[in-house]
Amino acid sequence: MPEFDLLVVGGGPGGYVAAIRAAQRGLSVGLVEKERPGGVCLNWGCIPTKAMLRSAEVFQTVSAAADFGVHADNVRFDFAAVRQRKDGIVKELTDGVVGLLKANGVTVIEGHARFTGPTTVEVCEVGPSPIGPDGPRYAAAPTAAIRQVSARDVIIATGSVPARLPTPGAELPGVITSDGAFGLTEVPKRIVVIGGSAVGAEWASLFATFGSEVTVVEMQERLVPLEDKDIGVALGRSFTKRGITVLTGSTVTAIAEGGPLRVTVDGPKPREIDADVVLVGVGRRPNTADLGLDAAGIGTDTRGFIPVDDRLRTGVEHVYAIGDVTGRALLAHVASHQGLTAADVIAGHRAHIDYTVIPAATFTHPEIASVGLTEEQARAAGHEVITAKFPFAALGRAKTFGDTEGFVKIVAGHKHQEVLGVHIIGPSASDLITEGALAISLEATLDELADTIHAHPTLGEIGMETALAGLGLPVHIAPRKR
Ligand SMILES: Cc1cc2nc3c(=O)[nH]c(=O)nc-3n(C[C@H](O)[C@H](O)[C@H](O)COP(=O)(O)OP(=O)(O)OC[C@H]3O[C@@H](n4cnc5c(N)ncnc54)[C@H](O)[C@@H]3O)c2cc1C
């Protein structure tokens, strides 16, 4: 008899959510975690970055208090206190996850899981982590096996780790990943961020607000290259206005000692940049190191991710995979949704995952959020499209906020005016995107968005105003010339 109905390997937002759902469906559930419950999201990703970005935002707002008729003299920040606040939030949330697992009757097993067969694993002790580019991680290499565990079904939820750069000098001290950035005890005077996607852009925004001299080097033609082109261009302009040096279409070809680090950049504006810290934010790789996938007969794709079907099944019976390790939209909410679906499937419910509507947010200043197709993707998919834009500067609530930078762009079908994509850069973009997600999910049209009464004065009105613009009936901006 297997020890558990279900064993979940990895306690991130994929794994712990799957474990809770499966327990609520009546299964006996074990969860193995080698570091801290909550995974990357709670410990090294979503939450700690947002906690620190919020401190940066408060600093920025208070520094500009005079614009609001409020006087706050001698405004300064205390980076140690910023980190301490972040640590407190992380602890509260990770303790909360431990409590929830316990309350739902999930057995948590501490250690590194390694497959010995498709549904059997050995759990090993983990040794202390050396301080490297990933900073003071909690645990590292597995050591001695401490127990064998078997289950009827297994979910692999081992997530991802920062990708490494093959560039000469990438191993030098001072060259860190996003994980390593949490180990910084002071704000670097000069920092080069390699990679202008969500992770790199957020760190660049944070350190620029705290006064670092920031350079972002991005290989693609614009920042946040997965976003709609207009959004990437707007972020580049905004960063430049804030004093961030943005080098797009550029690559770092070498990092050398001197300055204390000297970064060689190749591209339209080749140069050498001296930096105190180089932060590498060039993507993620699946976390399957020493997992014993071979012993379970589980294959990976060419990039090492574990392919799954829409019920999260791997090629091996009784083995499922969810979250970043599947390589499907590396986002916490996607991991959690996959977790719920996999748990339901294992518990015998009819469930499958649909990736059509996946909102995503980047918490730079200005903030970015999007859902659905970009204009380029919509056209490439054969849609004849109309697009509409509405600026926050024309919105009363944005004026009262003192935050009018940015716009909303809607991409809609030309014939039926169904909403295909919503792209936002500006205040509260990450919250405003929910209306766009619902619109796409319900196959709403511009008419339906425009006909929905929105409260005034709110930032949310911008969805309605953009839809009106798309219909050629804008109220608070001048109509497009015909
Ligand atoms: C800086 C940064 C900011 C981010 N911000 C956001 C954001 O704002 N919004 C968002 O949606 N996403 C964000 N993400 C992405 C998000 O963190 C991930 O998509 C999410 O954590 C993936 O969840 P997961 O459960 O698949 O894996 P993970 O969170 O990576 O968790 C996997 C867990 O498995 C454990 N594990 C691995 N191998 C083993 C093993 N052999 N035995 C036992 N345990 C093991 C690990 O220790 C880890 O705890 C961010 C990521 C980063 C790096």
Image (cartoon, rainbow, N blue to C red):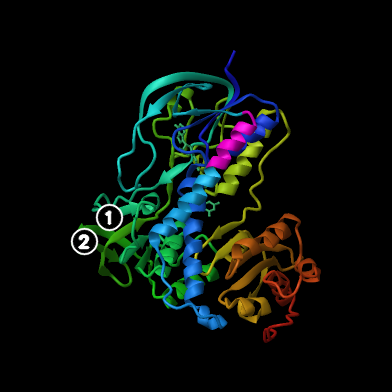
Residue 434 showing in the rendered view: yes
Given the image, on which type of amino acid does mark 2 rest?
A: Pro
Magenta segment range?
95-105
Image position of 304 with respect to 114: above or below: below
Residue receiving disc 2: 260
Specify few, some or many for label 1: CA neighbours under 10 Å numbering under 14, 14-19, or 20 or more: many
Q: Secondary structure at mark 1?
A: loop
Query: In the image, 426: left or right of 204?
Result: right
Corner quadrant of residue 439: bottom right
Residue receiving disc 1: 174
| Quarter of the picture holding the N terminus | top right
Q: Residue 42: give its label.
A: none
Furthest toward the top, the residue is: 1
| Image location (x, y in percent) of residue 368 | 55, 65
- Choose the circle earlier in sequence order: 1 or 2: 1
Q: Nearer the viewer, residue 188 or 286?
A: 188
| Quarter of the picture holding the C terminus | bottom right
Question: What residue is rendered at 63% in x and 79% in y?
Answer: 400
Corner quadrant of residue 475: bottom right
Specify few, some or many for label 2: CA neighbours under 10 Å numbering under 14, 14-19, or 20 or more: few
